Amino acid sequence: MAEIDLMDRYPRSPRPLEGRASHKLPAMIERARQFGKDYFDGDRLYGYGGYSYHPRFWTETVKRFRDYYRLADDASVLDVGCAKGFMMYDFKKLMPQMTIAGVDVSAYAMEHAIEEMKPFIRIGDAKKLPYADRSFDLVISIHTIHNLPPVECKQALREIQRVTKKHAYVAVDAWQDEEEKKRLLQWNLTALTAMHTDEWKNFFKEAGYQGDYGWFTP
Ligand SMILES: C[S@@+](CC[C@H](N)C(=O)[O-])C[C@H]1O[C@@H](n2cnc3c(N)ncnc32)[C@H](O)[C@@H]1O
């Protein structure tokens, strides 16, 4: 189990914290949490404000994962919360012999996924992954499991642990001080489990999660 920022090559985009905080209404949160068109391709106030593929997002990050975990050319990787399959696509481009899979709760994301990745994406919930025990060399979940309430988020961590043969990496909403907490709470729309990094570390232990982890703060 290691704390490591494997998202350090992912480009950071501008985040209008004040704008979102002052407009955030329960109805907006409810719409965002449907993980449909509003969340991915609607107004920035509801989520991404347009979630489109560009190689600059994941190309360097998938290399980072490959190198850090010393993945073999034919390794198998699962992306939990794969959305439109962008990371999957760049992984497969980098390692054509690999086995790639993705799961996401969003039917909208799957319908609008990169065409080549559609056959490898399943609709499903992180809390009950539709794969057998020890199916993948590496299971990755970026900014996804915190969208579940705590009990189910813990279940998702158990599931990730169950389906991996070896490695796992999760990135979750977290803060290390009051300033980060303020920023995160201003920005957060969909997360139901967000905590101090120390609390997350305990949470991982309680779940029996043995993989690696990193934090997201806007
Ligand atoms: C912030 S997005 C991250 C997408 C992608 N991992 C990335 O980093 O670009 C969160 C994703 O989690 C998915 N999601 C939310 N709750 C989920 C759940 N319970 N199980 C699986 N996926 C979920 C959403 O549909 C969305 O695609």
Image: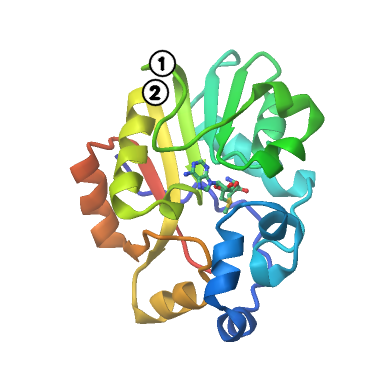
- Tell me whether circle 1 and circle 2 mark residues in contact (CB < 8 Å): yes
- Mark 2 — residue? 163
The vertical placement of 133 against 83, above or below, is: above
Pointer 1: residues within 10 angstroms few (<14), some, or many (20+)?
few
Quadrant including the N terminus: top left
Residue flagged by tag 1: what amino acid is it?
Ala
Quadrant including the C terminus: bottom right
Q: Residue at x 65, y 78 (%)?
A: 16
Between 152 and 162, the residue placed more toward the observer is 152
Between 71 and 117, the residue placed more toward the observer is 117
* Rendered location of residue 108, percent (x, y): 70, 43
The vertical placement of 126 against 100, above or below, is: below
Q: Is residue 19 visible?
A: yes
In this image, 196 relative to 124: left or right?
A: left
Query: Secondary structure beneath disc 2?
Result: helix
Residue 110 numbered tag? none
* Rendered location of residue 177, percent (x, y): 34, 76
Q: Residue at x 45, y 50 (%)?
A: 171
In front: label 1 or label 2: 1
Residue 132 numbered tag? 1
Pointer 2: residues within 10 angstroms few (<14), some, or many (20+)?
many
In this image, 96 relative to 25: left or right?
A: right
* Rendered location of residue 111, percent (x, y): 74, 37
Q: Residue at x 76, y 57 (%)?
A: 41
Residue flagged by tag 2: what amino acid is it?
Val
